[in-house]
Image (spheres, helix red, strand yellow):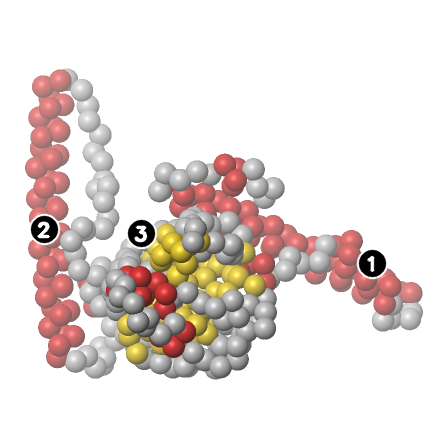
Amino acid sequence: RGYRMTRASHGAPPASGNYYYEVVILEPPSVKEIVNSLPPNVRISKKLQLEMQQALKMEEEQENQKAKEGDTQNEGEESKAAVDGTASPTTSRQNKGMEGTPSFGSHVRLGWSMRTGDLQAPVGYDKWSYGIRDINGSKIHCSKREDNWGGEEFGPGDVVGCAISMVPDSTMESTTVSSVNPRPSSPISQQQYQAQLQQPQPNQNHIRFFKNGYPMGEFIISKGKREGGAAFIIPDGVYYPAISLYMGASVKVNFGPHFIYQPRKLPTGLKFQPLSNLCKPPVSVEDAVAKISKERPCRKPEMHQKLVELVKVEAQLLEDAYQSHRAKHVMDVMEERKKRNLKTDDLENDEF
């Protein structure tokens, strides 16, 4: 019913390199489900009430139309089966979602935020967070929206990538892309000008966005090098993945190490590592036992042995949970790739 922001547990610190994560936009609930989930005393503006009523009416009309088409199709199949003399099993409706139904009120913003970003507001609300929204792919910072930067609208089924570059010896002051490269005196196209604005200097941290593996923003080829595409130039800090959902919207976040779409068509020399690299694997049981045996915090042999047994149990639980999560991660990415007819060779060869 209102925008809020949630942040990840791990963030990219200064001078740590280039990181990437992706977000799968899921189908929102139906208008009827959203209406039924609202509390009885909720306060909604007249405009929103009108939009809700219109969307609910349209959804009901489409459901009735689908039901009529289904009945007609079943009658045709029964007639065909009677003529052919073959039995035709009754099949359930294949398409749960209804194409053309407005996603009433469901919106998504995603990007990056410092710890000081306001959790009671959407991504891009204040100076501590930087985001992109589903409508027109507009980018937002300090509650200021920019539509014509080369962003693309996204919705259910799309995979949006979020990348950040934290470079060594970066400039500490916050700058806007328009101040990086002022408009040149020689005449150039608007696209070329935007691409120049979106080309960060070597000592500037920046944020990029992708849709289904392809970069948003404007690019140019200069002297054989691909340049541009940066959505924001950002100051030093620790930046966490951040997501805001509104009115029934839902997403699935993938921090790696495998991705549905690897970022492609990057500027020359730019490579990203998965954000999951910031979360190190748990210590093995053998290493944990060796460490506690070396430190020997308990002098009495019987107390030391009990401590070793407890450390073994905890280390084994952590290792089992990690392996289970990695195996599920591989299966989830493989499933999403198969939906999109993408290659899965690297996943089939994964050790998990």
Mark found first going from the N terminus, 3 or 2: 2
What residue is shown with label 3? 157
Give the image quarter of residue 169. Answer: bottom right
**Number of numbered tags placed on the structure image:** 3
Q: Which mark sits nearer the N-terminus, 1 or 2? A: 2
186 to 90, vertically: above or below: below
Q: Is residue 200 left or right of residue 33?
A: right
- The image shows residue 91 at horizontal and vertical percentages of 22, 36
Q: Which residue is mark 2?
A: 64
Q: Against 249, is 5 above or below?
A: below
Amino acid type for the residue under numbered disc 3: Gly
Please identify the quarter of the rendering in which residue 45 is found: bottom left
On the image, the x and y values in percent for residue 248 come to 29, 65
Element marked by disc 3 = loop
Q: CA distance from mark 1 to mark 2?
A: 67 Å
> Are there few (<14), some (14-19), or many (20+) residues within 10 Å of tag 2?
few
Q: Earlier in the sequence, mark 1 or mark 3?
A: 3
Tag 1 residue: 290
